[in-house]
Amino acid sequence: MNADIRIDAERLWSSLMDMAKIGATLKGGVKRLTLTDLDRQGRDRFVGWCKEAGLVVSVDGVGNIFARRAGRNNALPPVVSGSHLDTQPSGGRFDGCFGVMAALEVARTLHDRGIQTEAPFEVAMWTNEEGTRFLPVMGGSGAFAGAHTVEEILAGRDLDGVSFGDALRAIGYAGAAPVGGRKLGAYFEAHIEQGPLLENTGNTIGVVTGALGQRWFEVMVRGMDAHAGPTPMHLRRDALFGASFLIQEVNRLAKVTEHSRGTVGMILNRPNSRNVVPGETVFSVDFRDTDVSGLDRMEQGLRAAAAGIAREQGLNIDIRQTIFFPPCHFDQSCVAAVRAGAERLGFRHMDIVSGAGHDAVHIAGVAPTAMIFVPCEGGISHNEIENAKPDDLAAGCNVLLQAVLAKAG
Ligand code: GLV
Ligand code: MN
Ligand code: MN
């Protein structure tokens, strides 16, 4: 009988729009960087809604928030669903927020109808999924899953030198609950696709079977500061000029196969003065692929190119790996629960591999996990114009409800 219940689509949409006001940008997006005062405001609103829905809230030592609804048998490990509330600097209204609001909507629906599941149900909000202010990306879920130590997470520093630990304390979300170390019965994460496949194929639901592997680097190019006028071209050791060749190489390497990706998204140039030949340039590299061999190929290509450019241009180039996740394959029984939910509700669906990283990728290492994708307009994400249709979001949330009921009993 519980299989017949549906979420409240209007409440889901209005919660999303309400949350989007916190950090709203002029172009209709959201800038709510992790562990800023705007993040605190978003968290406070979320926690308030959780309490209204009768959930018991706890916060762990890296600021992950869990909002629990008791089951009939509380000795069972909880079924958990969630995502993140932090955004990119030019973020949209749905990346992450949809997964948290969808999980909350499931809890609200159970609360309204007085439905008690056999296992407890928890809504999770993971800290710093985006990795834009602090590395590592997906840090809160990574610490929960034991991929990073708590000390490593707290020690991370932003570009102004502020530590993660200090920023977490400043917003009042350094919680007392232990980080991870407990069993989850299952984990589901709903998310916009952030790519064009669902829209292009006319599918409403993406049954996510896994995610691309990722390897990120920080590349430090060192040359020598010099005067832009008197220094002849052949005597220069221009770090930015050297970096420009490597940025081209990252893109070239990724274009070799259809399933490879290569991005340079962050660059710091020093001293960054108009009439100084730059002596130091630091940039990020984000490689993704369906296979570790693809990541290895791109890494080797980058290192070989760097050695050549360092030699030719008298530069010193250091390449340091900052992130690595192998390609991830979600749990077959959780994937089947998502597919069954989509079928039961009559939504057109397709299997899909996520190009983006998600908290689910870490949680998949410690709990049976799957994800649900819904289309977003033009496949555009990490952009203020990111958009999704209320009906599609409601469909994804209803599939989430079905999957949670299937696993929580
Ligand atoms: C997360 O936003 C990612 O980089 O895929
Ligand atoms: Mn996301
Ligand atoms: Mn994102």
Image (cartoon, rainbow, N blue to C red):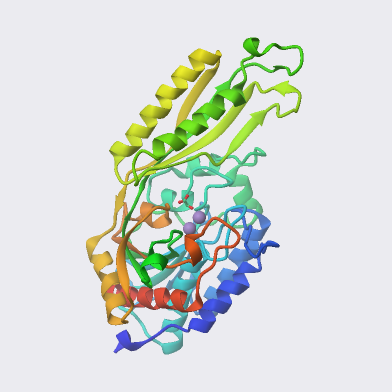
Q: Nearer the viewer, residue 405 or 51?
A: 405
Q: Quadrant of residue 81?
A: bottom left
Q: Is residue 55 above or below residue 216?
A: below
Q: Nearer the viewer, residue 120 or 21?
A: 21
Q: Is residue 316 above or below residue 149?
A: above
Residue 73 shows in this picture: no
Name the image quarter holding the N terminus. bottom left
Q: Quadrant of residue 280?
A: top right
Q: Is residue 346 left or right of residue 90?
A: left
Residue 25 rendering spot, x and y as whole percentages: 68, 61
Q: Is residue 351 above or below residue 155?
A: below
Residue 49 shows in this picture: yes
Q: How many marks?
A: 0
Name the image quarter holding the C terminus. bottom left
Residue 221 rendering spot, x and y as whole percentages: 56, 23
Image point 27% across, 65% down: which residue?
335
Residue 198 rendering spot, x and y as whole percentages: 38, 66
Q: Is residue 155 above or below residue 84?
A: above
Q: Is residue 296 left or right of residue 57?
A: left
Image point 41% across, 77% down: which residue?
395
Residue 169 rendering spot, x and y as whole percentages: 62, 51
Q: Nearer the viewer, residue 169 or 162?
A: 162
